[in-house]
Structures are given as structure tokens and as C-alpha cells.
Amino acid sequence: MVRLAQQLVRVASCNPPGNEAQVARVLAEAAGGAGLRVTTDEVAAGRTNVTVRLPGSGADPRTFLYCGHLDTVAVGSAPWTRDPFGAEVADGLLWGRGSVDMKGGLAAMLSGLIAITRSGVRPPGDVVLCALVGEEVDCAGARHLLATGGMAEAAWMVVGEPTGLRVVVAHKGCARLRVVVHGAGAHASRPDLGVNAILNMARVLPELAAVDVSGPPHPLLTGSTSAATVISGGSAVNVVPDACTVDFDIRTVPGQDHRELAARFEAVLADAARRDPALKATVELTYDRAPVTTSPDDALVTAVQGAAEAVLGRRPELGGVSFFTDASVLQPPTGVPTVIFGPGDVGLMHQTDERISVSELVDAARVFAALPFMLW
Ligand SMILES: [Zn+2]
């Protein structure tokens, strides 16, 4: 398993642009070589989803789904202590981009399936691993899987994103709102002839930043947050700017309607326009990923806790995380009970010097091998 994790880390699949085809091939070959059924699905040129199937005995038509992503974020500009694509193992740690998020998790999930295959014991239904492209940018692989019926048989889903082996039953959603303030261009020597979009944005921005984005309290999640993250405006130093754009990244909790959040922004702008008729603005929901939550009493949650307890010798706590996963695309439309569970320190995701504990990888693989049998 460690060798497989190393092979996956050594094949760069930074997104953008993704280019996951090569890392998909490494995963597919490892699975095929172990006797598992492998299908690949080209989502776009050079971007391939991989589905690995461990056939069950046929006694149950339901499928147990493991899910992960093949892409990683970029290396970043800060220098690394070790080569980000070297996949060095030292002092019990495997280093490299994607070791935590989440090639380590993919290696652990596939190793779990391989262990079941070697055992000769068959679960009643199929166990399927979906390794998807594009999670870090637009969830292209998950959207493709959903659109092509890949969730039809799934009765349970475990997403192997890093949780430090905590059993995560809820994560936040993400709504990105783009506010454009429209002005009127003019020669900079005659600002009186134009409407300065930057200044109008500056006036309304504090009110937008203060919009209440809170939702119903969730016992395992912190409250919703809003951050203005990108601003742009103006085209030349000698032209009064006719547009200014600010993007907001809002992290939401279960029960929130992202379109209703956009309406709250629109109400603030409408109010401002009543005070100043020259202020014209639009709001667009540019990115929409739903929050995900599964009841702590669900059989899947109990099974993951049981499998983890059997391996770790302690019952892991239930938790929630602030980042979202492919489950944002796959879970809300299907209602499939979903748990996020995987190896790796959440604090090292997307970081310089990303690294993962080898023993945690091994523990995760053992949980992934045991888990289907705790459900059936
Ligand atoms: Zn991830």
C-alpha cells in the first residue's frame, strides 16, 4: 500500500489543469493487477474517472461505495523541505503533494479492496471504489459520475478525504457570490461625467460583508462564514472605472438555501440603490456546493465507528469539517448515507510540506477492508 501511495504521489495531477489520466492509469493498473474489475471513463480530454469493482456474492443488489479524488492542489510558491513529488518515506512519514489530500486515502481504500479480494470472502453486495477527477476545482468527475448513473446502486458512501481517522458525518457547503457594481466610464480628467464603480463598491462593500449568512445551528459544525476574497475593477489609470467586481466565499451549514443567501445580498444592494440611484449592481451565484449531513444514528455511521474501533482499539468520535467534498455533488440529490473518513491530518491539506503518517495509512486500509462486513 505504501508503494502504491508513493506511485500516486509521484505522478503530478495538480489542478488546474488536472491531467489526471496518468495517475488514473497507475491506480487502474494496481487494481487490475490485483484481480479487481476496472473501468475507466473519460470525463474530458486527459481526465479519467476510474471505477474499481469488487463483486459481491450477489445476495444483495445494493452497492457499497468508496469515493476519492485523483487531483491535488498546486505545489505553491514556498520552498518544500522534501521534493513534493518525491514521495520520500522518512521517520514514519510519507511526504508529498497529495499524500494527505488524498492519494494516501485512495491507496488505503484500494488496499482495503485488495485485502478483501485476497481473503476470498465475498460481501453480499458489490464494493466499488470511484476515483474521480476535478474535486479541487469544479467536481467535474463527481458531476460526471452522477450524470451517468454511477450512484444508482449505491446504498452507502464513504469519502476517504483526510479526517485524521475521525468519523465525519457533516460538512459545510459553499456558495460563491459575485457582486458586480456597474458604473459609467469617462475620461479620468472629467470624473464628473462618469459613475465611479470602484467608489460605489467601496461604499456598499462593508454592508455586503456584514450580511447575516447564519443558518440553523448544527451540533458538529461551526457557524456559517462569509469572506470577500477577490476584487477587481477598472481598466486603465486614465479611465473612470465602469465596473468593479467582488467575489464572496460563503461556507454554509445544512438547511441553508444558497439562492436565499444571494437574495439577502440583493436586498442590501436594493436598499443602497434607494439611497443612491446611481448605484447599480448585480449578484450571481457562481459556485454552489451543498452542505452534507448524515444522521449519527445511521447504520453506516455505526459501522464505520465499529470498524475503526476494531482496528484502533478506541471508538473514534463523531465530527464535522468546514471543507466540502465530492459528497456535495453526490449526496444531496441521492440521499445516500455518507461518512467522510480517511487518513491524514486535516491541518496539512493544501499545505507546503504535506505529509502523512504511514501507520495511519495502514490503520485506514484495515478499516476500509473491515467496513463492508460491518454493514452486511
Ligand atoms: Zn480532497
Image: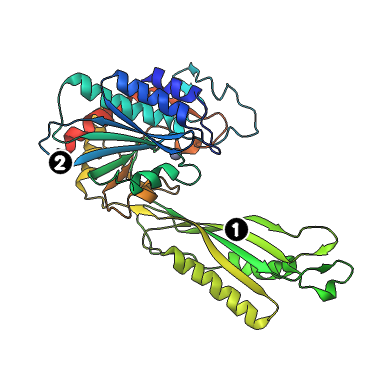
Local secondary structure at mark 1: strand
Instruction: Report ligand 1 position as a quadrant.
Output: top left
Q: Quadrant of residue 360?
A: top left
Which amino acid does the dot numbered 2 rest on? Pro
Q: How crowded is mark 2: few (under 14 residues within 10 Å), some or many (20 or more)?
A: few
Residue 291 coordinates in the image, percent (x, y): 39, 55
Measuring 15% from the left and 24% from the top, which residue is drawn there? 121
Mark 1 or mark 2, earlier in chain: 2
The answer to whether residue 273 shows anywhere in this view is yes
Q: In this view, does 88 lie to the left or right of 343?
A: right
Q: How far apart are marks 1 and 2 (CA)?
A: 45 Å
| Picture residue at 75% right of the left edge, 60% below the top | 234
Tally the numbered discs. 2
Vertical order, 169 against 71 (above or below): below
- Report the quarter where the N terminus lies: top left
**Numbered tag placed on residue 61 in the rendering:** 2
Q: In this view, does 298 lie to the left or right of 238?
A: left
Q: Locate residue 109 relative to residue 375 in the image: left or right.
A: right
Q: Is mark 2 on a helix, strand or loop?
A: loop
Left or right: 283 as drawn, with respect to 41: right
Q: Name the spot of residue 161 as percent of width and height, x first.
A: 39, 38
Q: Residue 8 carries which label?
A: none
Residue 73 x/y as whole percent: 53, 37
For image coordinates 69% across by 63% down, the residue present is: 244
Between 42 and 334, the one nearer to me in the picture:
42
Amino acid type at circle 1 is: Asp
In the displayed orientation, state which residue is furthest to the right.
189
| Residue annotated with mark 1 | 247
CB at disc 1 and ligand 1 closer than 8 Å: no
Residue 364 visible in the picture: no
Q: Position of residue 320 (x, y in %)?
A: 37, 48
Quadrant assignment for the C terminus: top left
